[in-house]
Image (spheres, helix red, strand yellow):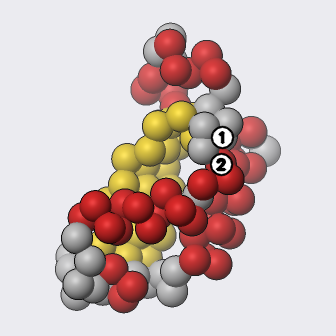
């Protein structure tokens, strides 16, 4: 198992602890950023899609803050860059 696969398992564990998830998809996009200065630090680039009722009524900024709070122990060592698609259960 690769380092980023191990990281993804830990991200998933922390996100499932923080939210009642209806959907979770974590994609490793580190290969798209090979040679990028930030990639040299060892942190990966990840794309996250999650859907949870906790996001209903929250602004996009508040949703992102909640995700960053759930993953704070991984930033910046494991996560260098994070793309977040945060949806409430009533959103597609």
Category of crowding for the residue at label 2, using alpha-carbon neighbours closer than 10 angstroms: few (below 14), some (14–19), many (at least 20): some
- In this view, the residue in front, 6 or 41, is 41
Mark 1 sits on what residue?
Answer: 78
Q: Is residue 27 above or below residue 2?
A: below
As measured in the structure, the alpha-carbon distance from the residue carrying label 1 to the one carrying label 2 is 5 Å
Looking at the image, can residue 62 be seen?
yes
> In the drawing, does residue 43 fall left or right of residue 64?
right
Residue drawn 64% across the image and 78% down it: 17
Q: Quadrant of the N terminus?
A: top right
| Local SS, label 1 | loop
Task: Kindly give the residue lying farthest to the right in the view shown.
Answer: 1
Residue drawn 32% across the image and 67% down it: 62
Looking at the image, can residue 8 be seen?
no
Q: Is residue 55 above or below residue 9?
A: below
Mark 2 sits on what residue?
Answer: 74
> In the drawing, does residue 41 fall left or right of residue 20?
right
- In this view, the residue in front, 54 or 21, is 54
Q: Quadrant of the C terminus?
A: bottom left
Task: Evaluate if marks 1 and 2 touch, with contact meaning CB atoms under 8 Å apart.
Answer: yes
């Amino acid at each position: 198992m690769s380092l980023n696969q191990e990281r993804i398992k830990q991200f998933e564990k922390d996100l499932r602890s923080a939210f009642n998830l209806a959907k979770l998809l974590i994609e490793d996009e580190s290969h798209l950023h090979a040679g990028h200065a930030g990639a040299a630090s060892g942190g990966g680039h990840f794309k996250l899609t999650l859907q949870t009722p906790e996001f209903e009524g929250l602004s996009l900024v508040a949703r992102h803050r909640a995700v960053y709070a759930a993953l704070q122990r991984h930033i910046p060592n494991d996560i260098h860059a994070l793309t977040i698609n945060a949806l409430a259960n009533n959103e597609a």
